[in-house]
């Protein structure tokens, strides 16, 4: 009888889906994305800064991002005072959620995300994609997100 109970316990344990950091990260992302969608912002401005220890300095320049009707219209490098023309759609907040989803799906070795309490937009993201790999850590910061007319 004891061995049957032990076997039943083991089989039941194997059938359940374990919870772990990825599950909590996914729940946080889903809740944040729902807050963002509920806010309904399609016109907004914010400051964006990419963080990378071994990237070219210009990659870490603060940028002003302007989105109108859900489309990124302007990304300005505030240090060089130039327009950024590469990957403009990638700066929209929904694409930032997609980026975080990619980190979760890839099971990044370390992922720390802070979301805006009301809007749900990412505020700070730090990721180490591969444990033990040198110089692959990176992230980004979003601040001063404001609705725009």
Image (cartoon, grey):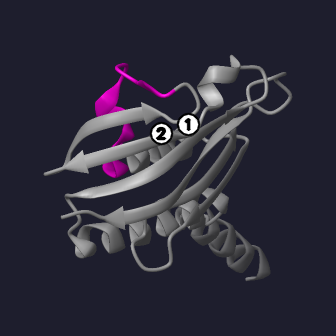
Magenta highlight on residue 84 = yes
Q: Is residue 32 above or below residue 133?
A: below
Magenta highlight on residue 60 = no
In which quadrant of the rendered view does residue 19 lie? bottom right
Would you name the residue on which mark 1 appears?
106
- Residue 48 percent coordinates (x, y): 51, 45
Tag on residue 65?
none
**Residue at image point 50% right, 71% down:** 116
- Residue 38 percent coordinates (x, y): 24, 75
Quick check: 94 left or right of 11?
left
**Label 2: element kind:** helix
The quadrant of the rendering that contains the N terminus is: bottom right
Q: Is residue 73 above or below residue 5?
A: above
**Residue at image point 68% right, 16% down:** 56
- Residue 47 percent coordinates (x, y): 49, 50
Q: Is residue 42 above or below residue 147?
A: above
- Give the Cα separation between the discs numbered 1 and 2: 6 Å
- The residue lying toward the viewer, choosing from 18 and 90, is 90
**Residue at image point 61% right, 55% down:** 124
Would you name the residue on which mark 2 appears?
102
Q: Are marks 1 and 2 in contact (CB under 8 Å)?
A: yes
Q: Nearer the viewer, mark 1 or mark 2?
A: 2
Density class for disc 1 (Cα within 10 Å; few <14, some 14-19, many ≥20) is few
**Residue at image point 48% right, 68% down:** 27
The quadrant of the rendering that contains the C terminus is: bottom left
Outermost left residue? 69
């Amino acid at each position: 009888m004891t061995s049957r109970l032990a076997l039943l316990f083991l089989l039941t344990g194997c059938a359940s889906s374990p919870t772990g950091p990825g599950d909590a990260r996914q729940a946080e992302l889903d809740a944040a994305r729902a807050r963002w969608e509920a806010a309904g912002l399609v016109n907004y401005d914010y400051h964006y800064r990419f963080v990378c220890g071994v990237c070219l300095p210009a990659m870490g320049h603060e940028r002003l991002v302007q989105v109108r009707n859900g489309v990124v219209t302007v990304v300005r490098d505030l240090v060089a005072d130039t327009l950024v023309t590469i990957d403009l759609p990638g700066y929209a907040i929904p694409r930032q959620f997609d980026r975080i989803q990619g980190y979760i799906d890839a099971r990044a070795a370390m992922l720390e995300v802070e979301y805006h309490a009301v809007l749900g937009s990412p505020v700070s993201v730090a990721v180490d994609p591969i444990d033990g790999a040198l110089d692959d850590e990176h992230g980004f910061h979003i601040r001063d997100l404001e609705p725009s007319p």
